[in-house]
Amino acid sequence: MNSGVLLNGFLSFVILLVLHLLIRRFIRVQREILLLFMLFLLIPLLYFTILAIKSAEPLTNLTAVAAVYFSLALVYLQTYPVLTVEIPSFKILRLVYRQKGITETEIIASMKDDKELFDAKVEELEKDSLVRRCQDGRYELSGSGRTLANLFILYRSLLGTQWGQG
């Protein structure tokens, strides 16, 4: 693998990352998970497939560029939720940073009444049509939500991780 392969894979990712940041900044997207899927997985897959068919470039080079790109894209997709929603770990870090020292009791007290973490996630899942609210107020998984949940369950079982464990 030469430096051109690494550079092309990296630049491919950076171009889509900048595009995603511009879309996120200036356009209100209702189904963000779908946008991420299309922008970082589906469109590049089609692009690299067409390039492999039409290009005179050796297939090994294109495959290597695609591997670099998809490695970066998958890492971004895995970390993206952490960057967009205030998760408990980052909230604790922010509390400790702002107060230059805080007791465990103070941390627990500030986290107890933090309903916004839950509300933001439920709202995001509804917008992305992964869950739906029933008339009686309960939530149910949609078909795509069930598929995603099954993938996570499979992934966690492969890792040997039980529910409620990290």
Image (cartoon, grey):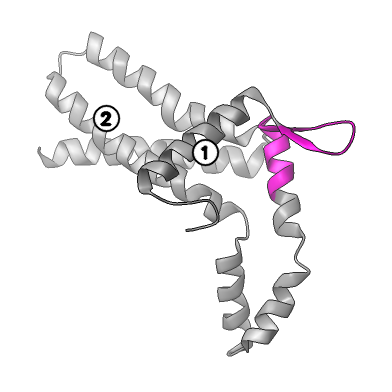
Q: Nearer the viewer, residue 151 or 84?
A: 151
Return the disc, 1 or 2, that comes first in the chain's sequence.
1
Magenta-colored stretch includes residue 87: no
> Rounded to the nearest whole Å, what is the CA distance between mark 1 and mark 2?
19 Å
Q: Nearer the viewer, residue 118 or 31?
A: 118
Judged from the image, the secondary structure of the residue bearing numbered disc 1 is helix
Residue 62, quarter of the rendered image: top left
Judged from the image, the secondary structure of the residue bearing numbered disc 2 is helix
Magenta-colored stretch includes residue 135: yes
Q: Residues within 10 Å of mark 1 (few under 14, many from 20)?
A: some
Residue 112, quarter of the rendered image: bottom right
Q: Is residue 41 visible?
A: yes
Left or right of 148, for residue 17: left
Disc sitting over residue 20 in the figure = 1
Residue 28, horizontal then vertical, whole percent: 70, 37
Give the magenta part as a residue range. Answer: 121-140
Tell me what residue is drawn at x 44 percent, y 23 percent.
42
Residue 1, horizontal then vertical, whole percent: 10, 37
Tell me what residue is drawn at x 27 percent, y 16 percent.
51
